[in-house]
Structures are given as C-alpha cells and as structure tokens.
Image (cartoon, rainbow, N blue to C red):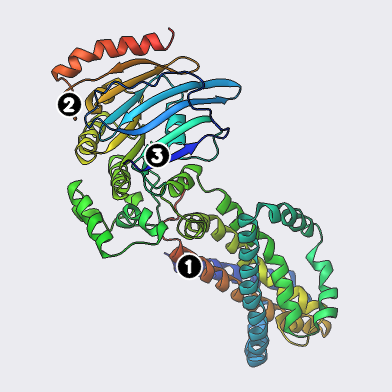
Amino acid sequence: MKIVRPLLLVVSFLICWHLLVQLTKVPHYILPGPVAVYLAFIQNWSVLLGHMGVTLTEIVLGLLLGTILGCLCALTMILSPLLKRWLLPVLVMSQAIPVFALAPILVLWLGYGIASKVAMAVLIIFFPVTSSFYHGMQRTETDLLELARIMGGGHASILRFIVIPNALPAFGGGLRVAAAVAPIGAIIGEWVGASKGLGFYMLHANARMQVDRMFAALILLAVVSVGLYYLVDFLLLKIIYWEKPRELYHE
Amino acid sequence: MDRLTTFTGFFKSRPGADGVATVTDGLSQTGKTGVRCRSISLTYDNRPVFDRFSLDFEAGACTCLLGPSGCGKSTLIRIISGAKDIAYRGEIQLVEAEKGLSVAWMSQKDLLLPWLSVLDNIMLGAKLRGEGDETTVEKAYMLLAKAGMTGDGHKYPPALSGGMRQRVALLRTLMEQRDILLMDEPFSALDALTRLRLQDLSATLTRGKTVILVTHDPLEALRLADRIVVLGGTPATIVGDIRPGGVAPRESGGPEIVKEYPRLLKTLLGGDGA
C-alpha cells in the first residue's frame, strides 16, 4: 500500500490532465498534454539534467549553510540573553521584508553565479530554522535544569546532554519547513539573473513558447523538491529516534 | 572536625540576633546533624512562608516533612538544594559536605530523558560532570540488579510503566552517592500498590543516608520516617514532631503505625487551622 498509494495518485493525475487537454482542446502553447511533456523530457534529457544539477547544488548548499547559521544564531541567543534582546527584534523585522524583493539586489551584489541563489535560499530558511531551534531549547523543563544543576553539570554539558536534545523535535519541524521552501529561494534567484539552473531553463523555454519543455523542467523540480523533503524527513526520524510519529485520530 | 558547607541567604543573616531556639533534642540515631537550617525567613507573593524558622535534620536518618499544600515544604527542600532563584534570609549548613556537591534530588516527576537508555539515565550525573568510566557502568548495573531491573538497562523510558520510571529515577538519585537525599513527594504520582513497593525499595536502598522526604501522605511518613516533622500555619511553624520508633519500612498495619496514625492525623488537621 505504501508504494501503491502515491503511484495511484500520480497515474490518476496524469489521466485527468490528459483528458482535460483532449476535451477542452487547449492550444499546446497554453497547456501541453502529458505525452508532449514526456517527449520534451526525453529529447532534452541531458540538458535538463545539467540544469537540475546546478539547482540541486544551490538548494543543498543553501539548506546546509542556512541550517548552520540558524543554529549558531539560536545558540547565541540562548547563551546570551543580552545579545538575544538585540538579535530577536532584528530577526523578526527582517521577516517583514519580502525576500523576493531582495533577489535583484543579491544578484547585483553576488553576481549571476551560484552564490546569489545560495544566499536567497539561506535567507528564506534562516528564520524557521533559528526560531524553531531557539524556542525548542527555551522550552526545556525547569525541573530538568534544576536536576542538572544539583548534579553539578556545567553550562556546556547541560547544553549538550539536555537542552539541545530537548530542542531537536521542535527543530525538526523547522528543518522540514526549510527543506520545503529552500527550492523557492533558488528558483527566484535564477529567475532574476542566471545562466544555469532549472529556473533559468523554465524562463528561457517560456520566452520561446516551448511550454512542453517548461513543464518538463517544472516536473523535474517538483520531483527534486519532494525527494529532498523526504530525505530530510527520513534523516530527522533517524536522529530523533525517541519521538515516534503517530496519528492523533484513527481513520 | 566537621566540614561545613554553608549557603547564606540573599540578605546577610545576623546569627544569634533573632533569638529563636533551634529544635534539637539529641534523640537522633547518629547523634550528628546532617543539615542545619538556621533562622530562615522568606516571603512569597507578599505572604510570609517562613519567619525565622530553624530546624536540624539528623545525619543518617530519614526525616519526613509533612504538612498541607503550600506550607513551604518544597521551598525548604529547594533552598537546601542551593537553588539560586529563591531569595531568603538565614543560613543553611550542610555538615560534612564537600565542594557544595553533597545533595541529590528526586522529584515527583521522574525527569527521565527519553533520548537516553535506562542505563544512561541512571548515569546522567556522571555524564554531566564528564566523569563516567567502567566503574560507573558497573555501579549502575549493580543498582539495576538491586532494584530488580537487571534486564532493563538498554530500554528507553517511553517503554516503561510509571512505577518503573520512578524506580529508575530513584536509582539515578542513589547513583550520585550523596550523603544527603532530598526527596520531594517522590511517590505521590504512583498507584497505591506500586507506591508501597517503591517505599520498601527506597527505605532499603537509602538506609544510612540523611534523607529529607517531603510528603502529603501521613501513612508514607509513618512507614518511612525516623522522625516526622509536621509543618503548619502561615508563616510555617513546627506543629508536630513524632518519632514512630522501629525500623523503616514499617508494615502498613504494624503496631507503630496503628499507634501513631490517629495522633498524626489530629496534628495535621490542627496544623491546617481547620
């Protein structure tokens, strides 16, 4: 059932798509059918794969860098309440600026290469990562800290053995959000200015009315994003082994 | 010569200036004092919890603090543990304490870490201080065996029942090898039968240590205590001081309990001001 369910979903989606195109007779430059997209996919396979590699690199680098920076920021805020009072408002205010509005500036500063896209992805995931990790650590039970104090634990070891593990389930929630939105950052960056990547390829194909190619790139991007999300989800379930996923209500 | 660790309250106390006699009666089992509370005063929410309250806890004996909710029993335990967030006036002395690390604490909640196995939970103190080695592991296994949990070391807390979890918490407390054990209603969240079993285990394993046990349950106090101190009133004062006699754990229907129970209840009810 585990494999049958998504397969069934994909097949029924493809059939609906095909029927929609057949029945409404939409022109192919508005909505190509699944067969046309499949053909475009086969014909441009190696080109698509090259662009996918670039986009995937941007997403993964952005995810890694954003997670590291977010964790460092959260740790700083936990260790120094004084710095927290200055950092937290800045962090919240930074969320009021739409990241999309920053894309042209980032491209201007960091160039057409991979750096500006990585920076976009970092900017997008920084807040969910920092906020989830910080609040996860802050939610450590007072009695637990009291126990650790009486046992004679130092700051560093209390952080390592109690506070950080305690934050991991909440942090996992933030990291899942990050994995889901990181591709947005990379694609927006590519739209504003790039010569490689799936976002660039989609814009390029769109301008030439090659809508079938655009859809092929779109589907590839979706597959990459979903794959990345499930990889992160899988790793988190392994790392946070003590929290078993469960259903709140029965079917 | 006793080694002394002294916590002095938030405000400097003036020993001897307030003229309150300490409750000492020389009836202790070892004749020595384990924990000395001198002239403790503290207020909570503008309500005086203690006003120049003094009490000595005998070394090597189990003293139960009994009294109505909110009378300050748990607060007293917390300031003995050296909590820094409670401002009080007065002096706490831990006799024969080394480097201030002389107490172990057990609360009503088991406080087990779900990401550590039972064995690692028991050794948490050593881990936090960075001093775990083979003898620590050996000692943890020995304690597990004493508690009848030989095969359970590798299990994780979510797989254990409430009684088992609290048993692990007791072992974690004993693992600290402290002279003074502070137990804050350690068995109150358990069902009656499990509670009886854990009281027996606890009484056996903590024999010879200075135990300060806070409880709501008069029967628990009568089963476990060498001395029962009943607190009551605002600010709290000692309204009863009972020594049940015999050796803990006493049988629930034993003669000492049958004899003392009515008197203890009367004291409790009287101390409640009802």
Q: From the viewer's perspective, is B271 left or right of A65?
A: left
Task: Check residue B103 in the rendering and tell me which mark sits there, or answer none.
Answer: none
Above or below A149: residue B265: above
Q: Nearer the viewer, mark 1 or mark 3?
A: 3
Residue type, label 1: Phe
Q: Chain of mark 3?
A: B
User: Is residue B22 visible in this depiction of the protein?
Assistant: yes
Q: In the rendered image, which residue does mark 1 sit on? A: A234
Task: Quote the CA–CA distance across marks 1 and 3.
Answer: 32 Å
Q: Position of residue B265 (x, y in %)?
A: 31, 12
- Furthest-front residue in this view: B1
- Density class for disc 3 (Cα within 10 Å; few <14, some 14-19, many ≥20) is some
Q: Position of residue B84 (x, y in %)?
A: 53, 40
Q: Chain of mark 1?
A: A
Residue A112 sits in quarter: bottom right
On the same chain: label 1 and label 3?
A: no
Q: From the viewer's perspective, is A156 left or right of B67?
A: right
Q: In the rendered image, which residue does mark 2 sit on? A: B250
Q: Nearer the viewer, mark 2 or mark 1?
A: 2
Q: Nearer the viewer, mark 3 or mark 2?
A: 2
- In this rendered view, identify the residue nearer to me: A64 or B180: B180
- Density class for disc 2 (Cα within 10 Å; few <14, some 14-19, many ≥20) is many
